[in-house]
Image: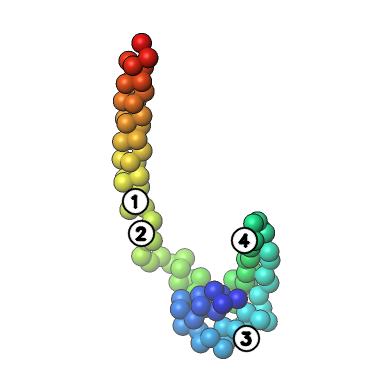
């Protein structure tokens, strides 16, 4: 519940008291997993309550900065593949 209140407060500018009141009345929480004392709990919130927020999101805006690491990860994968090939070649030479 604290994370949900923080979300509404920080992302949508809702004061914490109103966020708590809204979440208490209009949110369904579901336990999605319980593994090794780790709990996964999801809040289900009606989109209709935030039409303006989602309308702005659908109209576009700044893209998230999630794709900037793609090239770095690709190069890292390539470097690991080359290193693996070199190590395999060295192992095969040593065994023969």
Q: Residues within 10 Å of mark 2 (few under 14, many from 20)?
A: few
Q: Residue at x 34, y 51 (%)?
A: 69
Q: Is residue 44 left or right of residue 88?
A: right
Residue occupied by mark 4? 38
Disc marking residue 69: 1
SS for dot 3: helix
Q: Is residue 40 left or right of residue 77?
A: right
Can you give x and y, in whole percent of width and height, for residue 61 in the image? 38, 66
Placement of the C terminus among the 4 image quadrants: top left
Tag in front: 4 or 3: 4
Mark 2, residue position: 65
- The picture places residue 6, in percent across and down from the top left corner, at 51, 78
Compared across the picture, whether 78 is left or right of 51 comes to left
Q: Badge 4: how crowded within 10 Å, few (<14), some, or many (20+)?
A: few
CA–CA distance in space, label 4 to label 3: 27 Å
State the separation of the CA atoms marked 4 and 1.
29 Å
Q: Nearer the viewer, residue 51 or 65?
A: 65
N-terminal-most mark, 2 or 4: 4
Q: CA distance from mark 1 to mark 2?
A: 9 Å
User: Counting residues from the N terminus, which is met first, the one under dot 3 or under dot 2?
Assistant: 3
Front tag of 1 and 2: 1
């Amino acid at each position: 519940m604290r994370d949900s209140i923080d979300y509404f407060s920080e992302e949508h500018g809702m004061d914490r008291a109103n966020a708590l009141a809204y979440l208490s009345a209009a949110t369904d929480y579901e336990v999605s997993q319980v593994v090794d004392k780790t709990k996964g709990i999801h809040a289900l919130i009606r989109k209709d309550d935030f039409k303006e927020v989602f309308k702005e999101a659908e109209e576009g805006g700044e893209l998230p900065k999630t794709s900037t690491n793609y090239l770095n990860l690709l190069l890292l994968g390539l470097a690991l593949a080359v290193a693996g090939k070199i190590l395999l070649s060295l192992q095969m030479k040593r065994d023969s």
